[in-house]
Image: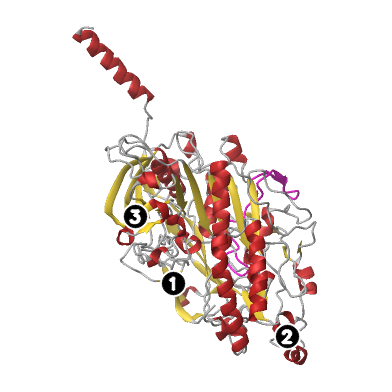
Amino acid sequence: MGKQSAAILLCLTSVMLLCAAPAIAEVTEIEIRDRRLLAGGISFGDAGPYERISGRLHYAVDPLDPANARIADLEFAPRDADGRVSFAGDFILIKPRRLELGNGRLIYGVNNRGNLVLLRMLNDAPWTNDPSTASDLGNGFLLDRGYSLLWSAWNWDVASGGGRLQIDLPVATDGGRPITGQVAAEMTTDRPTDILPVAWGNSIGYAPADPDTAAARLTVREAPLDRRRGVPRDRWRFVTDTDPDAPVRVVLDGGFRPGSIYELVYRAKDPRIVGLGLAGLRDALSFFRFARADTRGRPNPLANANGEPTVKGALIYGFSQSARVIQHMLMEGLHVDERGRAVFDAALVHGPGAGKGAFNHRFAQTTRHPSHHEDHLYPVDVFPFTTVRDIDSLTGENGSLLDRANALAAVPLLFYISTATEYWTRAASLLHTDVSAARDVAPSPRTRLYAVSGAQHGVGVAARRGIFESCPNPLDYRPVLRALLVALDQWATDARPPPASVYPTIAAGSLGTVVAYRAALPAIPGLRKPDSNLRPSRLNLGARFASEGIVDIVPPQPGPRFATLVPQPDPDGLDRGGIRLPAVAVPLGTYFGWNLRRAEYGAAERLGRWQGSFIPFPLTRAERVASGDPRLSIAERYSSEDDFAHGTAQAAVELVRDRLLLASDVPAIVEQARRAFRQITDGALAGCGFLENL
């Protein structure tokens, strides 16, 4: 072959390669700002030492690509020279220093309001947004098993500070002209104060278009559906702050009353394109899972020396708000990248209740979600709820959460984990009943549902009641999360069938109304029973919400409420129908997923957003009879600490058999049970001091 022919062939080959290459790159640049050995280079299991890499990811999405068609206001985003929409956000990657020693799987931990929760929930680690030391990594569970761990920023409204992950999302404009719109912001407080942020949860909120306008209005009511009473405009004002990233706040002369719901309706400016945060999450996973390098040639840290990606499979974990992010991505089909690839194979969806989120509409407030008392008028708990098609007989709507995922042929394996609290304050029964609560709805074949009996939303308590009537709930259910992560990974990686779903049902009589719950609950002395749980409303948000993501009715009009149910109690008051941890199967008291507010903090009929409670059994028969407590005493149940510990171990072994606990967690569970026995039987039960060392 002559030189001219070779040159022609080389040219043709280059053209073919260019034509075969992707037209765009979702992550255009990985900007590494820090790279170091993790925890001083100590080894984890067979994976050896890990390294920690952090910095910024620079994104560019194609506003015309069908994968981005669901992103509200994307057509109003500024575009770069290539016609794409660019933005950037923080990331943290923890990976084996030698990738070949890892297990080849990536776990993405969706952050919660900028905070890292994955290590806290799976590794029993302390709260930190800067995992660097050995103690920051808890028991090392995920690293010992060889996983790479990834976090990236997604929600623009996170206040800076505390190491929280930050992302810069573009502002929507109308041809360069500012966009304004009405915003409703609920504010509550547990203690008297003169000043409140317009948004809670480390959120900065939207700036008012005109802080001094007389058109803004503040109202107050005592319960979500009560009549609003106006607060005179001359009694309140916005706090002016020269820092654009400072939370928007309001001052009220005479102060805000604890427990009351204050609602501020005002015209805001400069809506961020909030749904791009979900696209950024998607594209971060896509880059680390599939890419060889960014567009500048900087290698993917999870690629090997030959530039080949090493991730064989990807899982995603979310807790509470971040679990609702996963729900919302699935509903919108935003788990599939611009090249049609599902960016994760399986999801551990922990504590979402029935919710999605305010994650993809104009002036969306990402921190909001309905609870028993507050934030009812935000589009979070919206139909459909189940993973198989169902119908809302009232509105005629029909569908499933996974409709778009099914249409894209990209349905991940799903584990839903609910605690008792989610049934009381987050409408979790809608995950597996119809919206009238008349019948059970089984999950899809690629979904499993697990309810943890008696558990509260989060893990970790202080030894005090705080604003609540009962002592906090000390149940630590994180061992169940570890076992379920292993089972989910085995399902995704090896096609090993997972444990059967475990949750309360209407058919079994373990799921029912609050009225039935109150009737069945034992008459524990001094215990005030809740009279309702969260029943979200069907909201009228205006004609443009479904098609354009614009809320025209502010605040939205509440319509008929969805019917929701709660786990029913056994004679000890313990939830039936879920996974019973050894502490519940062999109990020292009654664990509740709810806790009522104390009257002095206002809203005394309402439940805490995330709080459960615990009431120990009487110590002796004589104490039980004297107090009128119908529950057997500890002395009547167990002959000794050893007898109690033996029962605990037996219950743990049964859960190991069912793959709902790991054998490696059993010794710690038994030891913790022994400490609890001594703490309760040796301590005074008048306060909550017996919780101190549990």
Look at the numbered disc 3 and give the secondary structure of its residue: strand
**What residue sits right under mark 1 in the picture?**
250
> Is 395 included in the stretch rendered in magenta?
yes
Q: Nearer the viewer, mark 3 or mark 2?
A: 3
Quick check: 74 above or below 563?
above
User: Which residues are drawn in magenta?
Assistant: 371-400
> Is 36 included in the stretch rendered in magenta?
no
The dot on residue 525 is 2
Sooner in the amino-acid sequence: mark 1 or mark 2: 1
Q: Are marks 1 and 3 in contact (CB under 8 Å)?
A: no
Q: Position of residue 596 (x, y in %)?
A: 64, 77
Q: Is residue 356 left or right of residue 126?
A: right
Residue type, mark 3 in image: Pro
Residue type, mark 1 in image: Val
Residue type, mark 2 in image: Pro
Q: Residues within 10 Å of mark 1 (few under 14, many from 20)?
A: some
**What residue sits right under mark 3 in the picture?**
49
The C terminus lies in quadrant: bottom right
Look at the numbered disc 2 and give the secondary structure of its residue: loop
Rendered residue at 36%/43% (across/down): 59
Q: Are marks 3 and 2 in contact (CB under 8 Å)?
A: no
Name the image quarter holding residue 406.
top right
**Whole-Å distance between the Cαs marked 3 and 2?**
54 Å
Q: Position of residue 463 (x, y in %)?
A: 53, 81
